[in-house]
Image: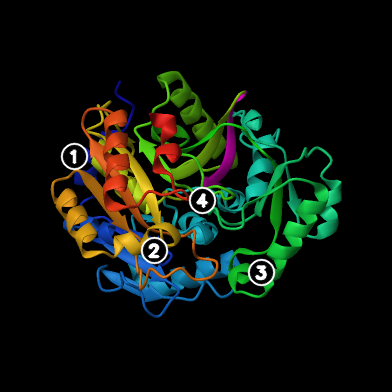
């Protein structure tokens, strides 16, 4: 069904994007390396603002501006004004503005407001950056009342000091303790009692104080009810509050005693009805928070009572998943984010997925030894060239050696592709793990992907 005022992706959207000038704020992560050539080939001028003096994209964009918004990002209004001043006469040429980086989203939102380009309110960016503010927004009776999202919000409390734990009257243990402003499995722990929660909280606070981690992401934490069910990533494309399209990725079982992701499956193996529930939930949660224009990432648990939100990321999701979507669906989410930022409303014809993908993460702790073997590298290279797999390496991986606190950070995403079914893609992946010696008692790919057997 045609939608009013929209243009069809990809051809018409790309035609409209040609010649646009886009301001991107935030030093992109290495995973976005491929996007610069896409923008360049489409004759899109990119002005990139990064906080560091060196940036891997500096030589690949039309203009790079170094500005330190990172050391102290508390005054977002001041940073936005400074960035606009640094642009000088280039301000009049800018057609759109967005960011790849969660912590820079509030500054970007202010810049969009001042430049009067498509975006969302700074309050929405601030709410999305904070898990507890997200929860409060979902439960609000007055905020964006068109969308009813309270039912998707789990019970949670902000923990800023140890005494706050005693005030969490609605929490039933076991529960989840995690950082309020961070989107990774790092510092996510299961706590089994109030005493255990206090112990874990104090240990994590000590770690934050002894590192620069707390300076960047803060030390405030959230105590949240433990949700049953499997996890799902839902990436949504929203324009003026309207859901244009969405993609659901299934998440496999976690590593034992951890919340580190082991495996993924896309397109989703869920029924169409359950996928629709997740897409609706993601759309309503984003809009309730105020994320009305852009490409956003959400994570849900599909519980016995329906979808429950784990977190919202007010920016395009993981670069690994973006690469997979481009392979399975022919959709580039970075490109779509740029289009929306420029006021181009994309519509998406229903397209049967090109293939099925089941992927696994490789960790130094479990896979380093075999991965570095020459024969393994040649085997993987041949399979990549045959388009049987995707091999997405962690950017700037200087060495694979497992260092303290980094053992559960993946260095590679190995994704099996199959044009027939999810089951066949899974079989390819599990057989490859056996052949290359990646499987073991501590990392059982058969069990981690058993939900798609």
Mark 4 and mark 3 lie on one chain; the one further toward the N terminus is 3
Does the segment drawn in magenta span residue 371?
no
| Image location of residue 452, percent across then percent down | 39, 30
Mark 1 and mark 3 lie on one chain; the one further toward the N terminus is 1
Q: Which mark is residue 29?
A: 2
Q: Which mark is residue 442?
A: none
Provide the residue span drawn in magenta.
305-313
For disc 1, the neighbor class at 10 Å (few under 14, some 14 to 19, many from 20) is few
Give me the residue at 21% from left, 54% from top: 380
Give me the residue at 49% from left, 58% from top: 408
Residue beneath disc 1: 11
Q: Can you say whether 214 is above or below 262 in the image?
A: below
Mark 1: secondary structure: helix
Q: Are marks 1 and 4 in contact (CB under 8 Å)?
A: no
Q: Can you say whether 38 is above or below 155 in the image?
A: below
Mark 4: secondary structure: loop
Residue beneath disc 3: 207
Mark 2 and mark 3 lie on one chain; the one further toward the N terminus is 2
Q: Tell me how far mark 4 sits from mark 3, CA to CA.
A: 19 Å
């Amino acid at each position: 069904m045609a939608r009013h005022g929209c243009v069809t992706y990809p051809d018409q959207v790309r035609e409209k994007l040609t010649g646009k000038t886009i301001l991107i704020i935030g030093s992109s992560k290495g995973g976005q390396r491929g996007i610069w050539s896409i923008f360049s080939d489409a004759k899109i001028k990119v002005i990139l603002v990064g906080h560091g003096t060196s940036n891997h994209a500096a030589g690949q964009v039309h203009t790079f501006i170094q500005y330190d918004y990172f050391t102290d990002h508390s005054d977002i209004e001041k940073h936005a004004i400074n960035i606009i001043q640094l642009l000088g006469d280039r301000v009049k040429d800018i057609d759109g503005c967005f960011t790849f980086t969660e912590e820079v989203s509030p500054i970007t939102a202010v810049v969009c407001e001042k430049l009067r380009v498509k975006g969302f309110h700074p309050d929405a960016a601030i709410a999305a950056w904070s898990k507890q503010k997200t929860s409060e927004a979902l439960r609000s009776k007055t905020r964006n009342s068109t969308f009813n999202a309270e039912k998707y919000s789990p019970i949670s409390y902000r923990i800023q000091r140890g005494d706050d734990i005693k005030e969490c009257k609605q929490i039933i243990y076991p529960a989840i303790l995690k950082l309020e402003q961070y989107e990774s499995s790092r510092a996510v722990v299961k706590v089994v009692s109030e005493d255990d929660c206090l112990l874990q909280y104090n240990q994590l606070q000590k770690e934050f104080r002894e590192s620069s981690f707390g300076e960047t992401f803060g030390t405030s934490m959230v105590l949240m009810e433990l949700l049953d069910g499997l996890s799902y990533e839902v990436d949504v494309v929203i324009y003026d509050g309207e859901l244009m399209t969405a993609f659901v990725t299934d998440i496999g079982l976690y590593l034992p005693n951890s919340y580190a992701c082991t495996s993924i499956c896309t397109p989703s193996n869920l029924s169409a009805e359950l996928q629709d529930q997740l897409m609706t939930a993601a759309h309503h949660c984003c809009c309730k928070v105020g994320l009305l224009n852009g490409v956003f990432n959400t994570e849900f648990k599909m519980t016995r009572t329906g979808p429950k939100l784990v977190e919202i990321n007010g920016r395009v999701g993981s670069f690994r998943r973006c690469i997979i979507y481009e392979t399975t669906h022919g959709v580039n989410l970075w490109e779509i984010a740029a289009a929306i930022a420029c006021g181009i409303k994309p519509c998406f014809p229903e397209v049967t997925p090109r293939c099925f993908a089941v992927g696994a993460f490789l960790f130094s702790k479990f896979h380093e030894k075999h991965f570095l073997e020459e024969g393994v590298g040649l085997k993987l290279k041949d399979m990549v060239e045959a388009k049987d797999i995707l091999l997405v390496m962690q950017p700037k991986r200087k060495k694979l050696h497992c260092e303290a606190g980094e053992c559960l950070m993946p260095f590679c995403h190995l994704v099996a592709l199959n044009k027939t079914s999810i089951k066949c893609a899974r079989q390819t992946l599990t057989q490859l793990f056996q052949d290359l010696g990646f499987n073991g008692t501590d990392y059982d790919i058969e069990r981690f992907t058993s939900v798609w057997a």
